[in-house]
Amino acid sequence: MARYDRVIPPGGRGKVTFSIDTGTVRGEFEKKAAIWSDDPENGVLTLILKGQVKPHILIEPGGYVSLWGVKGRVPQESLTIINNHKEPLKITGIDHDLEGKIRWRLEEIIPGYRYRLKVEDISGRAGEYAGHLIVRTDNPRKPRLVIIVNATVNPY
């Protein structure tokens, strides 16, 4: 978003404010804005805003787990939860709506900064199901992480 002084007197100064909504951008970005004026030497000036947006808490490879396999042999999947703050993060609990279908285990890899969440199918039945894991944290900026779980268990 850009805000600017609409009229600047000859020889005067103006102000341009240029911002980006980091809630909709992830990773590296580059945004440009053109400023037009009646200055004969500099009729168009381009401003470039570059940066990198790191989420408060990153889930790799993404916010989902896919459990695909054959009844009795569904592979375990894992995610890494990464704290991008200087202050340590505590995971205060994990809830889910998949009772009797999954089992999860949380490992602290680097205390307060990196966790591994392993999820496995325990349904013992062929079929499809989906649900959510809700990871609760002590970070006020990100008190909940929602992880989608999808499973397809084939009979053979």
Image: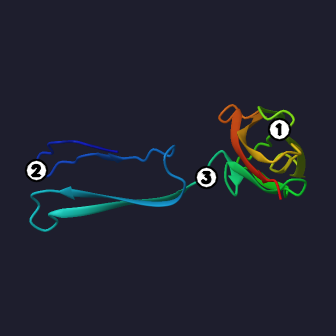
| Number of residues whose C-alpha sits closer than 10 Å to that of mark 3, classed few (under 14), some (14–19) or many (20 or more) | some
Q: Amino acid at mark 3?
A: Lys
* Position in image of residue 101 (x %, y %): 84, 40
Q: Amino acid at mark 1?
A: Lys
Q: Secondary structure at mark 2?
A: loop
- For residue 54, the mark is 3
Above-or-below relation of 88 to 31? above
Label 2 Cα crowd, 10 Å radius (few <14 / some 14-19 / many 20+): few
Q: Nearer the viewer, mark 1 or mark 2?
A: 1
Q: CA distance from mark 1 to mark 3?
A: 19 Å
- Tell which circle, 1 or 3, labels the residue nearer the N-terminal end: 3
Task: Tell me: residue 109, above or below residue 15.
Answer: below
Question: Who's the residue at 65% across and 45% down the image?
Answer: 56
- The residue positioned 69% from the left and 31% from the top of the image is 140
Q: Residue at x 28, y 63 (%)?
A: 46
Residue kind at label 2, given as amino acid type: Pro
Q: Nearer the viewer, residue 135 or 108?
A: 135
The residue indicated by pointer 2 is 10
- Per the image, the residue denoted by label 1 is 90
* Nearest the eye: 106 or 17: 106
Left or right of 53 on screen, residue 19 = left
Closer to the chain start, of discs 2 and 3, is 2
Q: Horizontal and vertical percent for residue 7?
A: 14, 42
